[in-house]
Image (cartoon, rainbow, N blue to C red):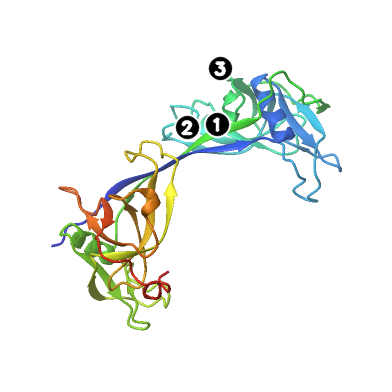
């Protein structure tokens, strides 16, 4: 039986954006325990605020302050909180329409259990002990016994030291399991061989194989060994070091058309100064001991390939 391959993978990056006047006022207001919304031309109050009316697409700049109490409009119980969620123990995700607002805000509701939550219940904001101008300045909502009160009132949106940008870490953890075609390809790489698959219709050899031709969409089963040498068809010089990467910058990342393949694959080029990498450069893979796949590609010392030999490589 062939080995069932799996690998834990993480996609992680910091998402950074600048804030316009509306979002800047909203997040700065949260830091100051003030909840701001926007009033549309027809009088609706939107919380959280948006910069354009979702109905008319008109620009909105009329800021208003609403209450920190509100009413649950709908909810769902979360019995198994995940890491980095608002509360470490079971809680409800709730849509809360704050007093003075016409739309609902999604956040966590701290309650003793699902039996303690109901649509129409009254809640209030529990502020975070440390606030920095983010939605997490609202630690959660909690039940309260107050009656609905208050109307939205005009607010200038002016605060000292306004928040002008945010950085949100985005992260996705998952386990990747390749299909039969890619498993054959990966197992061959562990033996320093490169396998592709030939399309029965257009006859192109795809590397790495996906089990179907990306051009024709038909299943591929015929295995073809290609390479190991190939030709650089295009490349870029990377000057920004990725977080936790163990590769010093600058380095070159390239499309490489392996001999016998019709689709180029990606690979890092090493063993040559970045300014000497060029289209047509002939390269070969380099494996590190124990690795299942090439660590990088290096020049073979052969003459450069003629442009016509790789100009059609995708």
Q: Residue furthest left?
A: 1
Mark 3, secondary structure of its residue? loop
Mark 1, secondary structure of its residue? strand
Q: Residue at label 2? A: 85
Q: Is residue 173 above or below residue 155?
A: below
* Residue 73, image quadrant: top right
Query: Is tag 3's residue or tag 2's residue first in the polypeptide sequence?
Result: 2
- Depth check, front residue: 310 or 35: 310
Q: How many marks?
A: 3
Q: Is residue 235 left or right of residue 222?
A: right
Tell whether label 2 touches label 1 (CB within 8 Å): yes
Tell whether label 1 touches label 3 (CB within 8 Å): no
Instruction: Tell me the number on the disc at residue 211.
Output: none
- Depth check, front residue: 239 or 210: 239
Query: Is tag 3's residue or tag 1's residue first in the polypeptide sequence?
Result: 1
Residue 194 x, y percent position in the rendering: 23, 65
Q: Is residue 55 left or right of residue 82?
A: right
Residue at position x 59%, y 24% from top? 137
Q: Residue at label 1? A: 108
Q: How far apart, in angstroms, are the residues tagged by discs 1 and 2?
A: 9 Å
Q: Is residue 182 left or right of residue 27?
A: left
Q: Residue furthest right?
A: 42
Q: Nearer the viewer, mark 1 or mark 2?
A: 2
């Amino acid at each position: 039986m062939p080995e069932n391959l799996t690998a834990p993978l993480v996609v992680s990056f910091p998402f950074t954006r600048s804030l316009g006047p509306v979002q800047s006022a909203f997040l700065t207001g949260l830091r100051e325990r003030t909840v701001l919304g926007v009033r549309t031309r027809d009088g609706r109050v939107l919380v959280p605020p948006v910069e354009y009316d979702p109905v008319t697409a008109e620009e909105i700049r009329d800021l208003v302050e609403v209450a920190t109490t509100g009413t649950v409009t709908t909810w769902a119980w979360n019995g198994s909180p995940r890491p980095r969620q608002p509360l470490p123990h079971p809680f409800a995700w709730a849509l809360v329409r704050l007093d003075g607002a016409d739309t609902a805000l999604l956040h966590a509701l701290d309650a003793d259990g699902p039996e303690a939550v109901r649509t129409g219940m009254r809640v209030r904001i529990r502020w975070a002990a440390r606030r920095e101008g983010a939605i997490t300045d609202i630690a959660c909502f909690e039940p309260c016994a107050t009656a609905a009160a208050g109307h939205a009132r005009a607010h200038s949106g002016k605060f000292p030291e306004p928040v002008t940008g945010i950085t949100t870490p985005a992260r996705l953890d998952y386990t990747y399991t390749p299909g039969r075609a890619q498993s054959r390809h990966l197992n061959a790489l562990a033996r320093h061989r490169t396998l592709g698959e030939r399309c029965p219709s257009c006859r192109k050899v795809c590397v790495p194989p996906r089990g179907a031709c990306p051009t024709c969409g038909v299943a591929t089963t015929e295995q073809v060994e290609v390479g190991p040498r190939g030709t650089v068809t295009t490349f870029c010089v990377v000057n920004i070091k990725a977080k936790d990467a163990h590769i010093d910058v600058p380095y070159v990342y390239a499309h490489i058309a392996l001999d016998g393949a019709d689709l180029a694959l990606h690979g890092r080029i090493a063993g040559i100064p970045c300014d000497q990498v060029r289209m047509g450069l002939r390269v070969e893979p380099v494996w590190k001991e124990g690795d299942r796949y090439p660590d990088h590609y290096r020049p073979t010392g052969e003459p450069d390939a003629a442009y016509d030999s790789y100009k059609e490589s995708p």
